[in-house]
Image (spheres, rainbow, N blue to C red):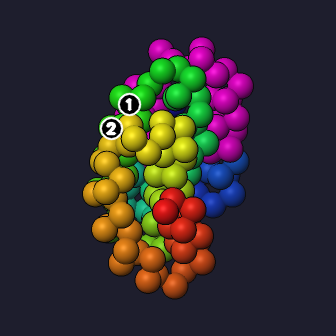
Amino acid sequence: AGGGGGAFGKESQVMLDGFGTVVNALGERTKPYLKQIVGTIKWRLNNKAPSVRMQAADLIGRIAVVMKACGEDALMGHLGVVLYEYLGEEYPEVLGSILGALRAIVNVIGMTKMTPPIRDLLPRLTPILRNRHEKVQENCIDLV
C-alpha cells in the first residue's frame, strides 16, 4: 500500500478498484498488512483533495469484509471512530462515501459491537438526513 501521488479521476479509481480486488482475493492472507493499509487510509482521509478522501472512504467499504475475516474487529471499531469524526465533511460526495464506509463496518461487525455506539451515531445523522444530495441520502438511509 504505497503513498499518495498526484493521479486523480479515472486512474486512481482504477487503482482503488484494483487494490480492493486484490485485498478481497487475498482474503485472510491480507492480515499482516491490514494495520498498514488502515494507516494509509486514515492518512488519505485527511487529504486536502476531496477525491482522495472519497476514495479512502470507499476503500473501507471494499475491504470491511476482509477485515472481519481476519478477525480485525478492533481495527474496524477504530475506523468507525475515525469515520464518525469525519461526519462534518463538507463535500456531499465525500460524505456519502464516509456514510457508506460506516454502513459497511456496521454490516460486518454488527450494531452491538459498533464504536461509537449506534445511539451516539444517530443524533449525528439527523442533520445529515436533511442533506439533499442523493448519495448522502441513500447512504444515510441505508445506515439508519
Disc 1 residue type (three-letter):
Leu
Residues under numbered marks 2 and 1 in contact, where contact means CB atoms less than 8 Å apart:
yes
Is 19 magenta? The answer is yes
For label 1, the crowd category at 10 Å Cα-Cα, with few meaning under 14, some 14 to 19 and many 20 or more, is some
Residue at image point 36% right, 29% down: 74
Q: Where in the figure is residue 57, as x and y percent of width and height? A: 49, 51
As drawn, 75 above or below 85: above
Q: Position of residue 28 (x, y in %)?
A: 59, 17
Residue found 48% across the figure and 40% down from its top:
110
Residue at 64% x, 37% y is 20
Give how far across and how far down residue 50 sits, in percent.
46, 64
- Specify the amino acid type for callout 2: His
Find numbered disc 2 in the image and state the secondary structure of the residue it sits on.
helix
Judging by the rendered image, the residue that carries numbered circle 1 is 75
Provide the residue designation for mark 2: 78
Q: Which one is in front, 33 or 52? A: 33
